Image (cartoon, rainbow, N blue to C red):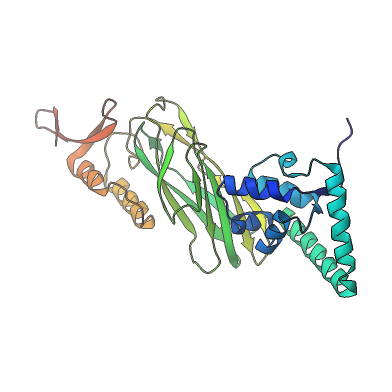
Amino acid sequence: MTQDITPTVCLDGIAVRRIREEKKLTQLYVAKVVGVTTDTISRWENNRYPSIKRENALRLAEALEAPLGDLLQADAEVCLLAVATERRRRRLLGVGGALACCLVLAGGYLALSRRGAPESGVKVRRVLPGFAAPGSVIPVQVRVESEGNLKGFIIREHFPAGWKLIEATPPASSLDNEEGMARWIIKAGEGRDVIGYLVRVSSEAPLESRGAFTGEAIVNPDGGNRSAEVTGDLQVAIAPYHWADLDGDQRVDDSEMLQASNTVDEMTGVHLDWDLLEKIWDAGAYKWSPELMRFTPLRHAPSGEESVR
């Protein structure tokens, strides 16, 4: 079977717009992921550029999370007619228009070169707690670190199926709890390098299993778009321990409480149950109820028996 290496493809603008709107994505988000302007996305959707570079089409399919074939014009005659019409329109622009087209293509090539370059100086890292009990709520942080001038970025996070994102700071730009996916668009100048969100663990998550997270980022250091994988913590253990209990000994000691306090401070804008955490810390121990799917503070009685506080 011969591989299709055609340098350009014929885009179906109506299909592109329909898929984007069905997925509740903005032209701004798609443009940021692809590495073009919103005006370009608009022209693609209105068939002003019926024939586009295959590389751009592949990136567009990635942004829309749709098969490339769904974005292409199926009718070859319609495609040829659209391309011919566009070529006639461009010839009417004269030399100035041709020069502008060359500049656009050169800019696209430069963007592609930058996108494929190593993302040196930029790190995107996820921080997960050590444990997550079924039905509980855990905090997740994604940190973006850059040695250069970072001009905005896009984060896409995938969390386990059946888990629900219930709150985020900043709020997610788009969210699909059915598929376990959320996106954030952080614009240049917003001064935010940490995204925090809360997920509710599925009540059916089996103990001693693990919940896996994956993520991607589109970063823009010094004006050049680059893709980066979200590294750091990739899994969390499903166990009957509170997220602040780092060693799983069913107590939250002073050092663990201090670290939990830092997490709460860094995630201002979401509502972690600080009152319960303080009660667990003050009581000295806790237990997890699999029937109620919640944690209960315990105080050790003088006889050695535990009492619910």
Q: Is residue 292 shown left or right of residue 140?
A: left
**Which residue sits at x=27%, y=41%?**
252
Give coordinates of residue 153: x percent, y percent.
58, 59
Which quarter shows the N terminus?
top right
**Percent from the top left, x then y, of residue 27?**
62, 57
Q: Which residue in the rendered view is the most extreme toward the left?
A: 302
- Above or below residue 228? Residue 107 is below
Would residue 209 be visible to someone looking at this image? yes
Q: Is residue 307 left or right of residue 146?
A: left
Reply above or below: 169 against 94: above
Quadrant of residue 291 in the image?
Answer: top left
Front-most of 62 and 206? Answer: 62
- In this rendering, the answer to whether 37 lies above or below 55 is below
- Res. 106 image quadrant: bottom right
Residue drawn at (72%, 44%) of the image: 71
> How many numbered badges does the structure rendering display?
0
Residue 282 point in image, percent of width and height: 18, 44
Q: Is 139 rendered above or below residue 184?
A: above
